[in-house]
Image: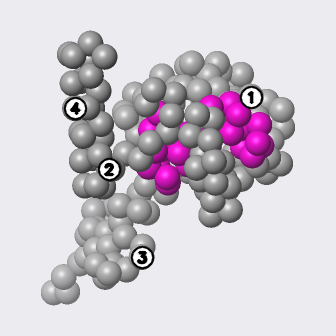
Amino acid sequence: MKASSPPPHQQQPPPPPDIPSGSLLNLETLLAALDAIEIYISSQVRTALNVEATTIHDELRTVFGDEAPSYRTIARWAQWFREGREEIEDEERSRRPVTESTPENIEEIRSIVSDDPHVTIAELQEYTDLSYSTVHRILSDHLELRKITARYIPKQLTDYQRSERVRICKEYLSRFTEGG
């Protein structure tokens, strides 16, 4: 007698194909991409059904937990979908580049500070037409300067600079204690 195969609804699905470990596409990446697509489509459909962004966000938090987008993101998407926008990619912006810490700007600020160590960040902004945060980042991160007694000085002193400062401080201290 011939062995019969089980009915189709009882058959086991074929095993998933093996994905090499060094492959760019792995199962976690694929699942994350599918989750992102599912979140996007769910948000778009629920918005089309006039469901409030808070409700959509609560539902997504229930399903995806901490992986769900923030409420602000969902609210922004919902607004875009209501306006007829299909894509959720940010639009191009015509503004300054994110980083203005170019070698030219760093050198310009270095030159100004070396000429006048009492210069303020506001004055540097005026001279260079850079933002406050960019000027501050260049001073502290690139030039490694910090403001002490209204003057920019190096964060790391050389041994000679350190010994000179100690000598001068001792001299001032002795003058002070002697009263002259």
Pick whichever of labels 1 and 4 is earlier in the sequence.
1
Tell me if label 3 and label 1 are in contact, CB under 8 Å.
Answer: no
Give the label on residue 79, or none: 1
Pick whichever of labels 3 and 1 is earlier in the sequence.
3
Is the N terminus in the top left, top right, bottom left or bottom right quadrant? bottom left
Magenta highlight range: 120-147
The residue carrying mark 3 is 24
Badge 1 crowding class, 10 Å Cα cut-off, few under 14, some 14 to 19, many 20 or more, is some
SS assignment for the magenta stretch, majority: helix
Q: Is residue 62 visible?
A: yes
Tell me if label 4 and label 3 are in contact, CB under 8 Å.
Answer: no
The residue carrying mark 4 is 170
Badge 3 crowding class, 10 Å Cα cut-off, few under 14, some 14 to 19, many 20 or more, is few
**Mark 2: amino acid:** Gln
Badge 2 crowding class, 10 Å Cα cut-off, few under 14, some 14 to 19, many 20 or more, is few
Q: Is residue 119 left or right of residue 144?
A: right
**Mark 1: amino acid:** Gln
Name the residue nearer the viewer: 121 or 102: 121
**Mark 4: amino acid:** Lys
